[in-house]
Image (spheres, rainbow, N blue to C red):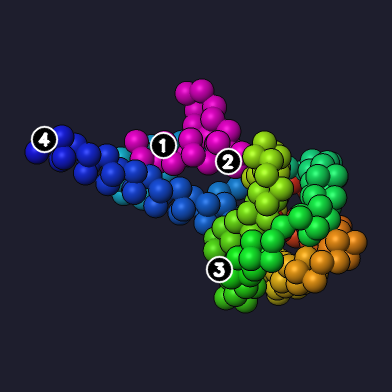
Amino acid sequence: MGHLKARNLVTARERLRDQVAHALRAALISGELRPGEVYSAPVLAEDFGISATPVREAMLDLAREGLVEPLRNKGFRVTEVNERDLDQYTEIRSLIEVPLVGRITKTASRDDLEALRPIAEEIVRAAREHDLIGYLEADRRFHLSLLALAGNDRLVETVGDLRKRSRLYGLTALDQRGELIPSAEEHVELLELMLSGDAEAAEKCMTRHLGHVRSLWAKGGGGGPTHRSGD
């Protein structure tokens, strides 16, 4: 019984860590946690009314996602990103994702592509409902699941890392202006083109989508380091 109790305690702690990480992501999106600022786990724990341990664990989860960076004996600094970073991330993603979409259009089964439709629709729904966390999660699942159809796990990891480093840029401002919805709807358009078997049109759509996302970053970012956006 002692082992079972210990296992239950571990599960409860993991749940708490996940809840804290979710709350911290929401605070990053809303701007409550500012880029470049340093936050300590004990101070944040006081805000949550819990011990520092699950907060520290949650912050380490965010550090693995590239959203914060640990500073020895100080806490965690919210990662900053500038226009040059965003340009480089977009260029790398375009070099990878555009031709890969064309290849997947030619090789993927219709069933595999259709399986992505609920996720594409979830992205649109989240954008319309101003569910930013839901938007980010559905967006991540769509893009990485689509790329996974190429069968290259390392490539999926690479794109996943690039997305983590740029996914919150300007998201709140874009949502307030209603500009997330057109970007969200491009996922459905891309899927329809791939299902039609038009690889060239699908590549053009992905090129336009990534360019659209980059232009939204510029609008959301206001020309300097700030929050980051998903796609």
Give the class, few, some or many, for how many residues have Cα within 10 Å of label 4's Cα (few <14, many ≥20).
few
Q: Nearer the viewer, mark 3 or mark 4?
A: 4
CA distance for labels 2 and 3: 20 Å
Q: Nearer the viewer, residue 48 or 161?
A: 161
Residue type (three-letter) at the residue carrying disc 3: Asp
Q: Which mark is residue 65?
A: 2
Residue 133 located left or right of residue 47: right
For residue 70: magenta? yes
Q: Secondary structure at mark 3?
A: loop
Labelled pair 1, 4 in contact (Cβ < 8 Å): no
Query: Which tag, 3 or 4, sits closer to the chain's start?
Result: 4
In the image, what residue occupies the spot 75% across and 60% down? Answer: 220
Q: In the rendering, at what x and y percent does residue 150 appear?
A: 71, 48
Query: Which tag, 1 or 4, sits closer to the chain's start?
Result: 4
In the image, what residue occupies the spot 55% across and 68% down? Answer: 131
Query: Which tag, 3 or 1, sits closer to the chain's start?
Result: 1
Quadrant (top left/top right/bottom left/bottom right) for the C terminus:
bottom right
Q: Which residue is mark 3?
A: 131
Q: Which mark is residue 57?
A: 1
Q: Which residue is mark 4?
A: 2
CA distance for labels 1 and 4: 24 Å
CA distance for labels 1 and 2: 13 Å
Give the class, few, some or many, for how many residues have Cα within 10 Å of label 3's Cα (few <14, many ≥20).
few
Tell me if I can see residue 212 in this picture.
no
In the image, what residue occupies the spot 85% across and 44% down? Answer: 95
Residue type (three-letter) at the residue carrying disc 1: Glu
Query: Which tag, 1 or 2, sits closer to the chain's start?
Result: 1
Q: In the rendering, at what x and y percent does residue 52 appear?
A: 35, 37
Query: Which tag, 2 or 3, sits closer to the chain's start?
Result: 2
Query: Which tag, 2 or 4, sits closer to the chain's start?
Result: 4
CA distance for labels 3 and 1: 25 Å
Give the magenta part as a residue range: 53-77
